[in-house]
Amino acid sequence: MNDSAYRVETAPRLAQWRVDAFSSASYRKSDPFRIGLWNWHLTVERNKHLLVKLYPEVSNLTREKPPIASFVIKLVSTSSTNRKTIVHPVIFDKQLKSNDDFVWAVENFFGGRFIIDVEFLDLKIAPPSGGEPSSIWNSYNIEKHSAATALTCFSRMLSEGIHTDIIINATDGSIGAHRAVLATRSPVFQSMFSHNLKEKELSAVNISDMSFEACQAFLNYIYGDFKADEFLTHRLALLRAADKYDISDLKEACHESLSEDIDTKNVLERLQTAHLYRLPRLKSSCMRRFSPPGKLNTKFEFVCVCVCDCVSCVGCC
C-alpha cells in the first residue's frame, strides 16, 4: 500500500489522517506524528464496531511526563454519496500513556473512505513533585522545557564524552570536554583557544591545582549539571577556578555560600579567602558574626589588619 496511507497531516494543534480502502476485519496504524512534546499514533480496527485509538508513542518522555490531553476527535466521510460526520464528546484533561487509554467504539459507522480529524485543545504535564498540571503551550512552560532540555543535552555531552575535542588534566585524572562550551562560559578559555597557545596546539588544558573530583564539579557547573553536594564539598576549589577562569556567576555563588555558614572554626580561613579573592561581603560577614552591633571586636580587628594589610579594619570591611 502507498506510504501516504499511513501519513498523518499536521498543523499547530491539529492532526488529520485520511483512511482509504479500509475493508472489514482489518487493522491499520498511522505513522508517528508530532503534536506538542510527543510523537503520537492513531489506529483504526474494524470488527463488530469501528475502534479508533489515539495515544502517545512509547518513550522515556511518555513514561516520565505522560500527556494530559484535551481534544476533539471526529470521523468525516469523504464518500460523494454518503457524506456524514460523527463527533465524539469533547475529552477534557485525560492522561494518555498507552493505546488503551482512549478507545472510541463507533457503532453506526458509515463505511467507505473517511478522515479522522483531531483538534488538541490543550496538552498538560504534571510537575514531578506533584501539584496542578500545567499547559505545555503556556509560553513560560515552553521556555522552561526548552532550557531544561538544552541543559540535559549539555550534561550528556560531558558525561558521555560526545564529540569531545579538548582534554582537561587535573592532578589525578583527565576529563574530555568541548572547546566551544568552555569558551562560551569563560573569556580565559576563549582566549586560550583563539590564540596559538600550547592549550590550542596540544588540545589539552592542565589544571594542576584541582583534584579530579573538584574538576568534575567545575565542569558540571559549566555544563549546567549543578549538584548541590558537589558544590558544597568543593566550594573553595570552585572559587579558585572561577576566579582564575573569570566565571563571574560561579564566583558569586561561592561568595554567597561561604558567607552563610561562618563559625569560630572557619572564620580565619574565610577572612583570608575574602582577602585573596576580593570578596568584601564575606569580610563584612566574618566581622559582623563576632562583633556586637556598633563595635569592633579587638581580636578580629587585629586579624583583619594582618590578613588585609590595612591600617584600619573598618576601612576595608
Image (cartoon, helix red, strand yellow):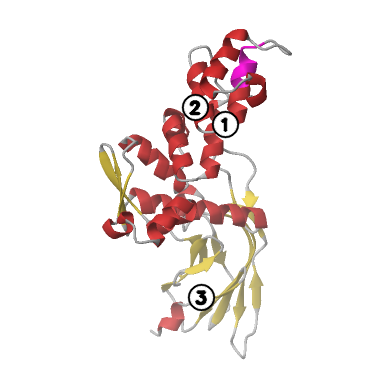
Determine if residue 9 is in view.
Answer: yes
Q: In this image, 22 relative to 132: left or right?
A: left
Give 87 or 308, whichever is nearer the viewer. 308
Q: Which residue is mark 2?
A: 273
Give 47 or 12, whichever is nearer the viewer. 12
- Cα distance, mark 3 to mark 1? 60 Å
In the image, the segment drawn in magenta is 285-291
Q: What amino acid is at disc 1?
A: Leu
Task: Pick whichever of labels 2 and 3 is earlier in the sequence.
Answer: 3
Q: Which residue is mark 3?
A: 8
Looking at the image, which residue is at 48% across and 64% down? Answer: 39
Across and down, in percent, residue 213 comes to 34, 35
Q: What amino acid is at disc 2?
A: Thr
Q: Which residue is mark 1?
A: 279
- Cα distance, mark 2 to mark 3? 62 Å
Is residue 295 covered in magenta? no
Task: Pick whichever of labels 3 and 1 is earlier in the sequence.
Answer: 3
Give 306 or 201, whichever is nearer the viewer. 306
Category of crowding for the residue at label 2, using alpha-carbon neighbours closer than 10 angstroms: few (below 14), some (14–19), many (at least 20): many
Callouts 3 and 1 close, C-beta under 8 Å: no
Could you say whether the residue bearing mark 2 is in a helix, strand or loop?
helix
Quadrant, the C terminus: top right
Looking at the image, which residue is at 47% across and 35% down? Answer: 239
Across and down, in percent, residue 121 comes to 66, 62
Compared with 194, 315 (above or below) is: above
Callouts 1 and 2 close, C-beta under 8 Å: yes
